[in-house]
Amino acid sequence: MANNKYYVSAKNKNLDIGLEVEELNPYMAAMYAYNILCDDYGFTDVFITDVESMGMRYKND
């Protein structure tokens, strides 16, 4: 199974945030980044502004 690496851009009030995440598709990457920012960092009013592909990584099972 392959995981893609994505750069997710987000905005919280006047703060621009960028995260690198590995997920199966850009939608899952956006949701993962959103959950990290809300749950782990306690941000509210988070908006995902962009998801860019950074390449693919392969996992050997």
Image: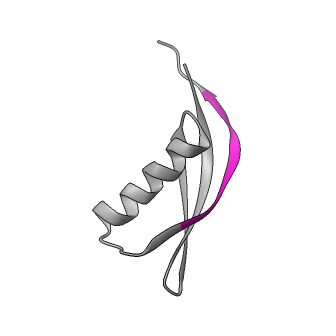
Instruction: Report the magenta residues as a range.
Output: 48-57
Horizontal side of residue 40 vs 20, given as left or right: left
Residue 55's spot in the image, x, y percent? 70, 38
Residue drawn at (39%, 64%) of the image: 37
Q: Is residue 14 above or below residue 40?
A: below
Residue drawn at (30%, 62%) of the image: 40
Q: Is residue 16 above or below residue 10?
A: below
The one of 46 and 53 positioned closer to us in this rendering:
46
Which image quarter is the N terminus in? top right
Residue 47's spot in the image, x, y percent? 51, 69
Residue drawn at (60%, 44%) of the image: 26
In terms of secondary structure, what is the magenta stretch mainly?
strand
Numbered label tally = 0
Residue 23's spot in the image, x, y percent? 52, 38
In which quadrant of the rendered view does residue 50 lie? bottom right
Residue drawn at (52%, 15%) of the image: 60
Q: Is residue 36 above or below residue 26?
A: below
* Colour scheme of the rendered structure: one colour
Q: Is residue 1 above or below residue 32?
A: above
Horizontal side of residue 12 vs 51, given as left or right: left
Residue 1 drawn in magenta:
no
Residue closest to the far bottom: 14
Residue closest to the far top: 61
In which quadrant of the rendered view does residue 3 lie? top right
Residue 32's spot in the image, x, y percent? 44, 49
